[in-house]
Image: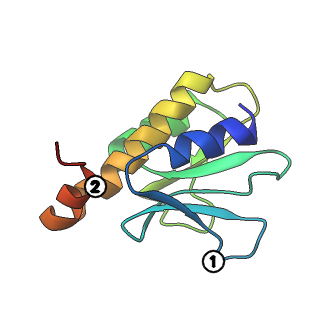
Amino acid sequence: MRWQALRQRCLSFDGAEETFPFGPETSVFKVAGKMFALSRLRGEPLSVSVKCDPLLAEQLRVTHSATGAGYHLNKRHWNTVHLDATVPDDEIIQMVIHSYEQVVAGLSKSARQSLTPSD
């Protein structure tokens, strides 16, 4: 996966925004002010940190050698995935989706409702 595709996917979610609280080289993707992904998009090697259910986080670390505990993050709830082509792109996308969903689930009801466009 290339950084452009990762960035585009992270920004495709309702309410997603890209911020740079750690400097211009590190993208932090948030929803309602809460982080769901973190990446040095032009870093070598490219990696992304995503929030994860603790049991799933452990399973992913065992399944994929490119997946480890979140770098400088809560190791129980965050994984860092090195995008070295050993983890299929569709699995990386699923991890990003799961992360977004984990963060949205923790938002207040009114914050969640504000993400869904009304018909």
- Residue shown at the point (71%, 31%) measured from the top left: 1
- Residue shown at the point (64%, 26%) measured from the top left: 87
Residue 92 drawn above or below residue 43: above
- Residue shown at the point (22%, 65%) measured from the top left: 111
Q: Closer to the N terminus: mark 2 or mark 1?
A: 1
Tags 2 and 1 touching, CB below 8 Å: no
Q: Secondary structure at mark 1?
A: loop
What residue did someone put label 2 on? Answer: 115
Please give the label number shown on residue 101: none
The reply to whether residue 88 is in sight is yes
Q: Position of residue 40 (x, y in %)?
A: 74, 57
Q: Position of residue 49 (x, y in %)?
A: 58, 53
Residue most extreme to the right = 44
Q: Nearer the viewer, mark 2 or mark 1?
A: 2
For badge 2, the amino acid type reads: Leu
In this rendered view, identify the residue nearer to me: 9 or 55: 9
For badge 1, the amino acid type reads: Pro
Q: How is the image coloured?
A: rainbow
Please give the label number shown on residue 21: 1
The reply to whether residue 67 is in sight is no
Give residue 64's quadrant in the image.
top right
